[in-house]
Image (cartoon, helix red, strand yellow):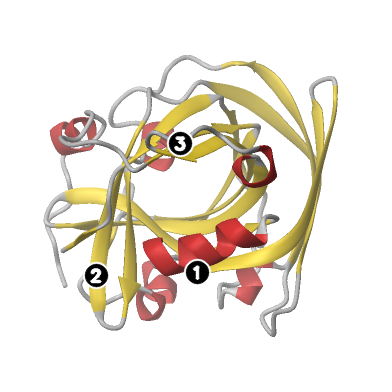
């Protein structure tokens, strides 16, 4: 499907808090955004036909993003230590439908099995259970992950250093295109869904990647990157998740 690309106004309007009450609250921190350009025709067979691949200057992008989640809780329920704090990795690209830009996830890995099961059931997202460890030494983060009990094996070993603060992204810039995303799309049994996300604009920092060994992209049917990624460090942000809606 050839949906008209969202203009800057549409990309800004999706950042506004949606009507209604959120169903989940959480915080995201210690993100490393790793992005690579990828040909649109490589992505097209992996994306539902109704979704149009979002591009910047005619180029599509794929992202590998490790981070940590904290204070996850449903509305009116306090955070619980054994399920509310965990690490996650997502592999994603960018799409739009009816002028609304969002994220399409190829995979998500988390180290809390209950969260994996819940997200698969209620958000229709392709979560996997992985053993994930994060160690922080001053500004340097050492992140390791190994997918568990799955025929679709994948791993990640990454070490990066968080640098100086970046200015807030400018609407229309590549940094804005890659990081300022406020909804996700998911599919289940031939049906397509959208989920709105609200948080303040990303606080971004420079990042220096000193090690990255990964098979995450390849496990999702994507080509192994041949060049160095575009890097941003991000967080923290406090997040509100709205109910899933069929589109």
Looking at the rendering, which quadrant does residue 90 occupy? Answer: bottom right
In the picture, the disc for residue 52 is none
Query: Left or right of 190: which side holds 127?
Result: right
In the picture, the disc for residue 126 is 1
Residue 23: percent from the left, percent from the top?
A: 33, 43
Residue highlighted by disc 3:
77
Q: Label 2, secondary structure: give it.
A: strand
Q: CA distance from mark 1 to mark 2?
A: 14 Å
In the picture, the disc for residue 192 is 2
| Disc 1 packing (10 Å; few <14; some 14–19; many ≥20) | some
Residue 7 vs 137, above or below: the answer is below
Residue 117 vs 139, above or below: the answer is below
Name the foreground residue: 16 vs 11.
16
State how many labels appear: 3
Q: Is residue 157 visible?
A: no
| Disc 2 packing (10 Å; few <14; some 14–19; many ≥20) | some
Residue ID at (64%, 75%)? 219
Residue at the far right in the pictured view = 137
Q: CA distance from mark 2 to mark 3?
A: 29 Å
Q: Are the two marked residues, 3 and 1, in contact with CB atoms closer than 8 angstroms?
A: no
Which of the two labelled residues, at mark 1 and mark 2, occupies the earlier sequence position?
1
Query: Left or right of 86: which side holds 49?
Result: left
């Amino acid at each position: 499907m050839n949906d008209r690309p969202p203009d800057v106004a549409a990309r800004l309007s999706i950042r506004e808090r949606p009507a209604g009450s959120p169903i989940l609250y959480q915080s995201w921190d210690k993100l490393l955004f790793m992005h690579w350009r990828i040909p649109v025709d490589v992505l097209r067979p992996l994306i539902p036909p109704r979704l149009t691949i979002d591009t910047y200057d005619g180029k599509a992008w794929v992202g590998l993003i490790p981070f940590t989640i904290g204070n996850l809780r449903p509305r009116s329920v306090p955070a619980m230590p054994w399920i509310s704090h965990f690490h996650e990795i997502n592999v994603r690209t960018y799409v739009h439908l009816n002028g609304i830009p969002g994220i399409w996830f190829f995979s998500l890995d988390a180290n809390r099995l209950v969260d994996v099961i819940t997200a698969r059931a209620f958000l229709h997202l392709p979560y996997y259970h992985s053993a994930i460890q994060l160690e922080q030494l001053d500004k340097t983060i050492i992140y390791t992950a190994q997918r568990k009990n799955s025929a679709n094996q994948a791993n990640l070993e990454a070490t990066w250093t968080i640098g100086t603060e970046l200015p807030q992204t400018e609407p229309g810039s590549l940094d804005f295109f890659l990081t300022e995303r406020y909804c996700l799309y998911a599919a289940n049994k031939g049906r397509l869904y959208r989920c709105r996300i609200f948080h303040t604009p990303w606080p971004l920092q420079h990042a220096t990647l000193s090690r990255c060994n990964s098979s995450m992209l390849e496990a999702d049917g994507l080509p192994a990157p041949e060049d160095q990624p575009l890097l941003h460090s991000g967080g923290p942000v406090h997040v509100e998740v709205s109910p899933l809606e069929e589109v």
